[in-house]
Structure formats: C-alpha cells, structure tokens
Image: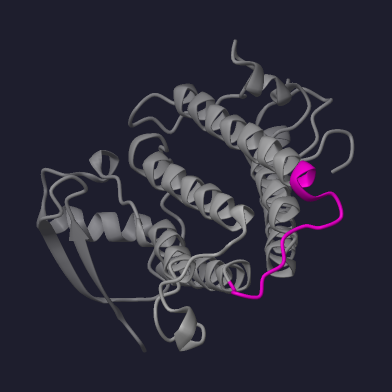
Amino acid sequence: MKHYEVEILDAKTKDKLCFLDKVEPNATIGEIKSMFHKSHPQWYAARQSIRLDPKYAGPLLLYLMFYFRVPFIYAPKYDFTTSKHWVVHLACMCHSFHYLKRLLETLFVHRFSHGTMPLRNIFKNCTYYWGFAAWMAYYINHPLYTPPTIYGEQQVRMALIIFLFCQIGNFSIHIALRNLRPPGSKTRKIPYPTKNPFTWIFLLVSCPNYTYELGSWFGFTLMTQCLPVAFFTAVGFIQMTVWAKGKHRSYLKEFRDYPPLRSPILPFVL
C-alpha cells in the first residue's frame, strides 16, 4: 500500500515540529493529531490546529505565474509582457484577494471541530483548486483574451460590486460562525443573524457562507466572461449544494427548534 510522509511545521516560525512516515492515505486529520500527540505529549489533540496552506497558496501563486506570463506558458514573444485590457488586471487583483483572504481565514479565523477528512482528500482538493486556477488563468491572461463586449465596462463594474459584496458577506459569516464556538469547544449551536447586516441572510439559508461564495464566483464569471471560470463556478455550486444539504439535514436532526424557513443554500429555492 502506498504511504505518505507528513512533515508538521510550526504555523508561526515554520520550524519543523515532527516528521511522520508511513502515513496511510485513509488516515484522517484526527489520526494525524494523535500521532503527533504521541511524540509531543504536551500537545493533546484539542490544542492542535493543523492548517494546510498549500491548498489555497497554490492557486494564488499559479494564477500569478500566468498573469506575469512567465516563460514556457505562452509564445516566447509574450514572456513577461502585460495585458492591454484593464479587466485582466482587475481579475488578477480579485483572484489574489480571494485566496489571500482564504489563507488568512485558515490561519486566524476558522476553528475546525472535526478531524474526519482523510489525508487522501487533501490531495484531491489541492488538485481541484490548483487545476482550475491554472485553467482559468491560462485563458484570462492569454494574449488573445477578449474582455466583455456586450455591456463592456458597465458589466465589469457590476461584476466587481457583486464580487466584493459577496466577499465581505462570506467573511462576515465566517466571523459569526467562529464566535459561535468557544476556543477548544466542539459545542454546536444554531447560527443566528447578528448586528452585522451581512449575517441577516441566516434568516433564509443554513449555509450563507456557501451562498456568498457562489455569488463571488458568479461575479468573477460575469467580470471575465470566461468559459473555464463559468465551469468552475458550476462545479463549485454543485459541490457546495451537496455540503449545504448535508449540513442542513444535520441541523434539522440535531435541533428540534431549527428555523423552518431556512433553505440549505439558496433562499426558497434550494
């Protein structure tokens, strides 16, 4: 059977804390925490937070490689040239902002209560995000790329508003969910709207973080008018719908007083 080698680093100093060899592909994050605890007894599982930066750092760096047109991607005459279309530069800023936000949230916002994801799934997720990032970036930053022409700048500006609105909304939901669970706790509570208007969508959906995520990629699709981006948005919508339905069912099963008007991801629709 194929095994993985796992190196665990300190999140702040990047110093190596532990090296685990012969880790099975089906091993979960929880099991890796237990292995780490055996070699470092002072760090029991509840005090550990394993964070996988490459999952989001990869798309960020890959996209920038296409944006700066490093050699061997396009024809040699285009090496290190820049696009003449301002929407290409705007798209790069939006894409970079999105994944920088994800990296910072992973480091400082998210609290993970379960360690059930198999290590093998982590590599699948990396392939998914990295592959789509490269596919999208190749076409958006291509020297022959054509920006939206039907509604032009008006379409791009509207798309930018949608993108930024949903990014702020997504971040607001993540903060609300973080505040719902004390540090080190596995307590589950029903999320409700807070004073932040971006959280009021909790009145209608169970997983508004996915709703805002979908809205962000819809805005990015509208901005770039690029088929690979639309395909990524569609695939992401299908996957997030599966996750949202699962979480919605678990809420209904666990809480008898769960608000009946809520839908999993799209108000009154899905």
Q: Position of residue 150 (x, y in %)?
A: 87, 55
Residue at the image position 48 percent from the left and 79 percent from the top? 78
Q: Which residues are magenta?
A: 142-155
What quarter of the picture does the C terminus occupy? top right
Residue 190 makes an appearance in the image: yes
Q: Position of residue 36 (x, y in %)?
A: 19, 57
Residue 250 makes an appearance in the image: no
Nearest the camera: 213 or 80? 80
Q: Residue furthest top?
A: 195
Q: Is residue 47 above or below residue 34?
A: above
Q: Position of residue 13 (x, y in %)?
A: 13, 48
87 on left or right of 73: right
Nearest the camera: 57 or 239? 57
State the image quarter where residue 193 is shown: top right
Residue at the image position 73 percent from the left and 34 percent from the top? 252
139 on left or right of 127: right
What quarter of the picture does the N terminus occupy? bottom left
Q: How many marks?
A: 0
91 on left or right of 208: left
71 on left or right of 11: right
Q: Position of residue 256 (x, y in %)?
A: 73, 24
Q: Is residue 195 magenta?
A: no
